[in-house]
Image: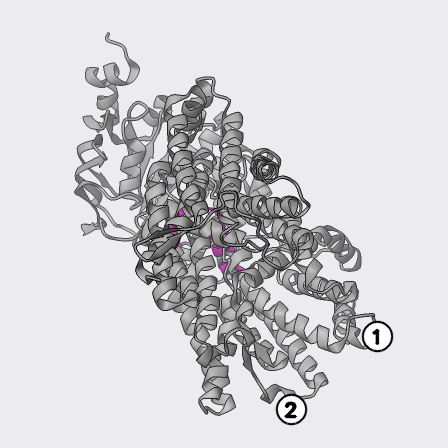
C-alpha cells in the first residue's frame, strides 16, 4: 500500500462523508441529487467530451425514463416493471436516435439534438392526460426509502459510474474515440467504423442518463416538462464544461460545485441561469478542460511526490521485433491491385479519365504528375474515400467499389499529404490507434510492442510518449507514414511521403519501402521528388490533367518525351 | 372569426419575422461558416430593450432606434469579441462558443428584465383591417411591408454595392477575397451587424403583437435556421421559406392547438437536419 493509494482512499472517504460534516448548504439531500445528476452527466460527457458529439438535448434522455415509468404506473403497472421498462425503453430510444443522428456532421447533429429536446418537452406538455402537463407526473414509491439509504445508493451508483467510465475508456476505446473526435476522415481511413463507434458511445451515454434519470424521478418525486427541455440540457452541457470535458471526475466536480453554489447562494432561480451561463461560456473560452483540467498538473506533481514514477518502457516482447500481423500470407505473388478504367468528374469537371494499371505484390509503384493531375483523387478512390464516376478498383480480384472506407484498412494502409494525427495522443498512441482496428486480437502489450518497433524503424522511439502536438511537421509526417504501414497491410498507399523530410529521414523512408517490398507487400507512392522515386520505384504511371500519359518501368516513363514536356515543362 | 383566414394572417406576421431572422443567420453563416446559435438573442435583446425603455417613458421612436442599435451592437460584439480572436478554432468549438453566448445572455436578460414576457405599444395604431373573416392589425401590415422592404434592401445591398460584393466574396472564398484586398474581418463584422440589426428590427415589429421573454432566443434561432436550411442557406429564398414556416406554424396552432406547435415544428427541424446532411461525409470538403 503506497502513500498515493492511501491519499486517494482518504479523499474518497472524505467526499462520501462530507454531507455529515455540517458544511452550510451541503446536506445529504443536496449531495444525493448531485451524485445522481453527476451520473447522468458522465453519460453526457462520454458523448460530448470523449467522442466530441455536440449533444445539446441530453436532458430528454434523463427525463424520459421517469415519464415512461410514471405513465406505466398511472395505468396500473407494478412499480418494478415500470422502472425496468422506463430504463430499457430509454436506452432503446437512444440507440434508435443514434441510428439517425450519428451520421449528421457537427452542426446538424447539434440542431437535431436540440430539436429532440424541444420535441420531448413539447410532447410532455401537449398530452396532459398522460404526462400530467405542466405540473408533471408524481411518484410516490420513493418516499418510503430513507434519506440515508437514498444517499448511499446514489454514492454507490456514482462510484460505479466513474469506475465503469475508467474501465471502458482505458486503452483502445479512448484512442478510437479521440481519433473520431478529432478527425473522422482519418479515423475511417485507419479502420474505425465511425458511425458505429459514435452510435455505441451515444447509447452507452444514454444508458447512464436513463439510470440516473429513473433515480432522480423517484427521489425527487416528480418529473416536469422543463426537466426534459433545452434549457436543462444546456445546463447539463455547462456543468460538464465547467467540471472538465472527457474526464471521469469532471462531471461530478462540476455538478457538486454548481449545486452547492445554488444552495448556499440561496438566490433561487434568478441567478442560477446566469451562473450556468458564466460557467458554460467561461469554460468554453478559457478553460477547455474545466476545473479538473486546471487541477491536473498540481495533482500529477503530488502523485509523483508520493509515488515515484515506475517507468513502463515499451520494449518489444522479442528483442527488436514486434508481433507481425500477417494480412498477406507469406509467398503471395502476382497481382495485388487492379485499377480498371477509372474516371472521375466533379460536377462537369474532369479529374481523371480512363485510368488503368495494376500493381503486383513485391513491387513499388509510383504515380507522378504535376499538381492537379488527379493523383490524390486517384488515391482517394483506391482507399474508398470517394466513389469513382466510372471504372472499378479490385484487390486480389475483389471489387472494392462498394466497401466502406473503414473496411479498406485491414488491406490498405494509407498516409496523407498533410499528416493527420490526433494532436493530444502520443506518437505511440497514434500508431496504436490503427492497430486497435486491424489487429483487435492482439493484447495491449503486443500492440504496444508492435507500434514501438514500427516507430523504432524510423528512429522515432525516443518520441513515443510525446503528444503529437509537441512534435515537428517532419516528425508528424514520419509518424503518419509509420501508422499507414504498421501491421504491414498488403497494399500501402503513401501520398507524397518525402515532402518535408530531411536527408536522414529520407533514408529511413527508403529502407521502410524496401522492407515492405521484400516482405512481399505492394506499395504505391505519389511523389514529386523524382530522384527519390527513381531510386526506389519499379514501375509507375504519369498523370497529366487527369489523363494517363505514360505507364511502365520507372526509368522508361521518366525518360518519355511527353512526360518530360508535361512534367518538367522542357522540350529537349 | 374565420380560423383559416386568421391563421394565414398570423402566419404571415410571424413568418415575416422568421424570414428576417433567417436572412441574418444566413449572411452571418456564409461569411464565417458558423451557425450563430446566439442569433435569436438579438431579437430578445432588441425586444426587451425597447420594452423597458418604453416603460421608462422614452419616446417610442427613440426606444425603437435604441433597441435596434443594441441588437446590432450585440451582433457586432459576437463577431468582434468572441469569434474573431478564435478564427483558427474548429467550427464545432465556435458553435459551442455561440451557444455559450446565448446561454449567458439568457441569464443576463432574466436578471435585467425579469421572468415575465414584456411588450410595448404598437408603433402603428388604429383599428385592425377586416379581411375575409380575419383581423389584420395595422402593425401587422407594417411588419410585412418592412420585412419585405428590408429583404429586398439586403439583396440589393449584396448585389449592387461595393461593400455587399465584398461580403459575398468573403462568403464564397475568404482567402481569395483577402488576396483581392477585401478586409475579410470588416466584412464579417458588417454581416453580424446587419444580422443583429435585422433581429432588433423584427423585435420592434413583432413584440407589440407577441410579447417576448428572456428565453425566447434559442427558439427564434432554430426557427430562423429551419427557414434558412429549407432555403438552402440562400438569403433571398429564405424570405419565402420563412413565410412558409410561419404559415405552417399558424395552421398547426390554429387547428391542433398551441401545444402542438413545438413538437411538430421541431420534428421538422430534426427532419431537416437529417435531410440536409445526407451525402455530407466528414463535415464535407476536407482534402485528404
Residue at disc 1, secondary structure: loop
Q: Is residue A389 above or below residue A440?
A: above
Name the foreground residue: A185 vs A483: A185
Q: Can you give x and y, in whole percent of width and height, for residue A325 in the image?
A: 39, 55
Give the chain letter at badge 1: A
Q: Is residue A531 visible?
A: yes
Q: Earlier in the sequence, mark 2 or mark 1?
A: 1
What is the span of residues highlighted in magenta in the rendered image? Answer: A170-193
Residue at disc 2, secondary structure: helix
Residue drawn at x 41%, y 64% is: B263
Q: Is residue B1 part of the magenta span, yes or no?
A: no
Q: Residues within 10 Å of mark 1 (few under 14, many from 20)?
A: few
Q: Can you give x and y, in whole percent of width and height, for residue A81 in the image?
A: 47, 88
Q: Is residue A465 visible?
A: no
Residue at the extreme front = B127
Label 2 to label 1: alpha-carbon separation: 25 Å
- State left or right for residue A99 relative to residue A45: left
Q: Can you give x and y, in whole percent of width and height, for residue B12 in the image?
A: 37, 49
The circle on residue A144 is: 2
Residue at the extreme top = A572
Amino acid at each position: 500500500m503506497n502513500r498515493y493509494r492511501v491519499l486517494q482512499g482518504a479523499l474518497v472517504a472524505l467526499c462520501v462523508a462530507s454531507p455529515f460534516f455540517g458544511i452550510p448548504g451541503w446536506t445529504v439531500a443536496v449531495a444525493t441529487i448531485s451524485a445522481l445528476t453527476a451520473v447522468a452527466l458522465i453519460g453526457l460527457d462520454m458523448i460530448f467530451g470523449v467522442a466530441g458529439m455536440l449533444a445539446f438535448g441530453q436532458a430528454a434522455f434523463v427525463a424520459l425514463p421517469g415519464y415512461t415509468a410514471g405513465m406505466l404506473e398511472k395505468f396500473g403497472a407494478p412499480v418494478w416493471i415500470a422502472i425496468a421498462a422506463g430504463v430499457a425503453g430509454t436506452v432503446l430510444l437512444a440507440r434508435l436516435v443514434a441510428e439517425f443522428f450519428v451520421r449528421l456532421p457537427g452542426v446538424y447533429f447539434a440542431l437535431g439534438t436540440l430539436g429532440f429536446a424541444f420535441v420531448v418537452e413539447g410532447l410532455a406538455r401537449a398530452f396532459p392526460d398522460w404526462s400530467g402537463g405542466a405540473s408533471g407526473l408524481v411518484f410516490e414509491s420513493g418516499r418510503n426509502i430513507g434519506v440515508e439509504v437514498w444517499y448511499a445508493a446514489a454514492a454507490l451508483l456514482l462510484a460505479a459510474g466513474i469506475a465503469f467510465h475508467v474501465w471502458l475508456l482505458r486503452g483502445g476505446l479512448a484512442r478510437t474515440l479521440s481519433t473520431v473526435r478529432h478527425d473522422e476522415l482519418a479515423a475511417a481511413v485507419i479502420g474505425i467504423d465511425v458511425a458505429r463507434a459514435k452510435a455505441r458511445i451515444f447509447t452507452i451515454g444514454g444508458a447512464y442518463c436513463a439510470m440516473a434519470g429513473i433515480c432522480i424521478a423517484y427521489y425527487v418525486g416528480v418529473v416536469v416538462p422543463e426537466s426534459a427541455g433545452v434549457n436543462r440540457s444546456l445546463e447539463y452541457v455547462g456543468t460538464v464544461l465547467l467540471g472538465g470535458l472527457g474526464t471521469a471526475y469532471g462531471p461530478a466536480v462540476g455538478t457538486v460545485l454548481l449545486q452547492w453554489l445554488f444552495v448556499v447562494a440561496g438566490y433561487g432561480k434568478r441567478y442560477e441561469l446566469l451562473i450556468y451561463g458564466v460557467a458554460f461560456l467561461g469554460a468554453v473560452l478559457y478553460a477547455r478542460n474545466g476545473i479538473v483540467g486546471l487541477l491536473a498538473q498540481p495533482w500529477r506533481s503530488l502523485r509523483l511526490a508520493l509515488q515515484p514514477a515506475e517507468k513502463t518502457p515499451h520494449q518489444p516482447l522479442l528483442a527488436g521485433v514486434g508481433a507481425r500481423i500477417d494480412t498477406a500470407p507469406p509467398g503471395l505473388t502476382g497481382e495485388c491491385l487492379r485499377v480498371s478504367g477509372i474516371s472521375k468528374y466533379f460536377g462537369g469537371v474532369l479529374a481523371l479519365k480512363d485510368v488503368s494499371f495494376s500493381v503486383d505484390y513485391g513491387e513499388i509503384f509510383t504515380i507522378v504528375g504535376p499538381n492537379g493531375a488527379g493523383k490524390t483523387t486517384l488515391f482517394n478512390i483506391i482507399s474508398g474515400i470517394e466513389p469513382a464516376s466510372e471504372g472499378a478498383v479490385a484487390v486480389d480480384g475483389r471489387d472494392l467499389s462498394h466497401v466502406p472506407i473503414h473496411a479498406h484498412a485491414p488491406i490498405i494502409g494509407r498516409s496523407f499529404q498533410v499528416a493527420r494525427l490526433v494532436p493530444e495522443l502520443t506518437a505511440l498512441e497514434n500508431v496504436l490507434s490503427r492497430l486497435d482496428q486491424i489487429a483487435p486480437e492482439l493484447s495491449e502489450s503486443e500492440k504496444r510492442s508492435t507500434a514501438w518497433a514500427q516507430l523504432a524503424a524510423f528512429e522515432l522511439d525516443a518520441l513515443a510518449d510525446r503528444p503529437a502536438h509537441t512534435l515537428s511537421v517532419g516528425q508528424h509526417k514520419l509518424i503518419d507514414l509509420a501508422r499507414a504501414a504498421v501491421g504491414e497491410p498488403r497494399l500501402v498507399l503513401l501520398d507524397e511521403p518525402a515532402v518535408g523530410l530531411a536527408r536522414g529521414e529520407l533514408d529511413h523512408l527508403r529502407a521502410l519501402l524496401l522492407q515492405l517490398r521484400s516482405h512481399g507487400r505492394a506499395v504505391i507512392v505519389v511523389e514529386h521528388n523524382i530522384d527519390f522515386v527513381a531510386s526506389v520505384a519499379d514501375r509507375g504511371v504519369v498523370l497529366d490533367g487527369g489523363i494517363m500519359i505514360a505507364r511502365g518501368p520507372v526509368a522508361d516513363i521518366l525518360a518519355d518525351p511527353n512526360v518530360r514536356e508535361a512534367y518538367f515543362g522542357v522540350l529537349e | 372569426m374565420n380560423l383559416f383566414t386568421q391563421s394565414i394572417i398570423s402566419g404571415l406576421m410571424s413568418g415575416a419575422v422568421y424570414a428576417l431572422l433567417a436572412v441574418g443567420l444566413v449572411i452571418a453563416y456564409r461569411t464565417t461558416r458558423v451557425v450563430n446559435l446566439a442569433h435569436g438573442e438579438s431579437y430578445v435583446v432588441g425586444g426587451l430593450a425597447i420594452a423597458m425603455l418604453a416603460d421608462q417613458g422614452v419616446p417610442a421612436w427613440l426606444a425603437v432606434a435604441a433597441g435596434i442599435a443594441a441588437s446590432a451592437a450585440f451582433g457586432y460584439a459576437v463577431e468582434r469579441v468572441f469569434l474573431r480572436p478564435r478564427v483558427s478554432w474548429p467550427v464545432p468549438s465556435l458553435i459551442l462558443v455561440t451557444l455559450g453566448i446565448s446561454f449567458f445572455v439568457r441569464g443576463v436578460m432574466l436578471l435585467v428584465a425579469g421572468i415575465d414576457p414584456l411588450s410595448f405599444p404598437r408603433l402603428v395604431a388604429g383599428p385592425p383591417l377586416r379581411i375575409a373573416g380575419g383581423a389584420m392589425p395595422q402593425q401587422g401590415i407594417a411588419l410585412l411591408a418592412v420585412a419585405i422592404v428590408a429583404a429586398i434592401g439586403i439583396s440589393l445591398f449584396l448585389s449592387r454595392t461595393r461593400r455587399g460584393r465584398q461580403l459575398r466574396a468573403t462568403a464564397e472564398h475568404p482567402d481569395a477575397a483577402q488576396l483581392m484586398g477585401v478586409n475579410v474581418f470588416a466584412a464579417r463584422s458588417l454581416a453580424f451587424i446587419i444580422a443583429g440589426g435585422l433581429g432588433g428590427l423584427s423585435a420592434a415589429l413583432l413584440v407589440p403583437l407577441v410579447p417576448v421573454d428572456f428565453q425566447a432566443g434559442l427558439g427564434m434561432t432554430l426557427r430562423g435556421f429551419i427557414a434558412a436550411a429549407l432555403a438552402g442557406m440562400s438569403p433571398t429564398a429564405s424570405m419565402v421559406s420563412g413565410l412558409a414556416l410561419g404559415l405552417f406554424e399558424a395552421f398547426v396552432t390554429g387547428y391542433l392547438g398551441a401545444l402542438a406547435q413545438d413538437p411538430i415544428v421541431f420534428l421538422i427541424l430534426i427532419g431537416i437536419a437529417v435531410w440536409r446532411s445526407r451525402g455530407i461525409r466528414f463535415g464535407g470538403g476536407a482534402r485528404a
